[in-house]
Every structure is written in C-alpha cells, then in structure tokens.
Image (cartoon, rainbow, N blue to C red):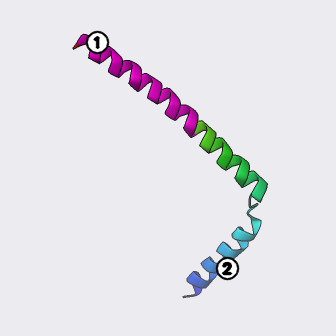
Amino acid sequence: MRKFIQFIKECITEMKKVVWPTRTDIVSSVKVVFVSTAIIAVILGVVDFLFASAIMKIF
C-alpha cells in the first residue's frame, strides 16, 4: 500500500510540471486540423471523381 501512495504522490508532482496549452493554442490547432481535413477531403473527392469518370469511359 505504501508503494501505491508513493506512486500517487509522484503522479501528482509530475502533473504539476505539465505545461497545459492555452485556449488560443487549442483553437489554432483545431483550425489547422479542420482546414487540413477539408483540403484532403477535396483532393480525394477530385481524385475519386477523375477515377470514376475514367472507369465509366472505359466500360
């Protein structure tokens, strides 16, 4: 039981050392993810359309 309590104390000490991101950092990161996802979705949509058109012309 003593080891468990020591472990919890060390966890709390380490969590106090963590530098948490600010709201501004989180918002900017979310924007980057959304924009990247949208760009990749558009690119994949265009490629899919081109491949589908090519297949329809072949068959």
Which portion, as a residue range, is magenta? Answer: 37-58
Give the residue displayed 28% in from the left and 17% down from the top.
55
Q: Main secondary structure of the magenta part?
A: helix
Give the residue displayed 78% in from the left and 54% down from the top.
24
Name the residue at the top extreme.
Answer: 58
* Residue 25 at x, y percent in the picture: 75, 52
Q: Secondary structure at mark 1?
A: helix
Res 22 quadrant in image: bottom right
Residue 8 position (above or below residue 39): below
Magenta span has 46?
Answer: yes
The quarter in which the N terminus is drawn is bottom right
Going from N to C along the chain, the mark reached first, 2 or 1, is 2
* Residue 50 at x, y percent in the picture: 40, 19
Q: Is 28 in front, or is 56?
A: 56
Q: Is residue 54 left or right of residue 40?
A: left
Q: Pointer 2: what residue? A: 9
Q: Which mark is residue 57?
A: 1
Task: Residue type at mark 1: give it.
Answer: Lys
* Residue 47 at x, y percent in the picture: 43, 23
Q: Is 31 in front, or is 10?
A: 31
Give the residue displayed 69% in from the left and 75% down from the top.
12
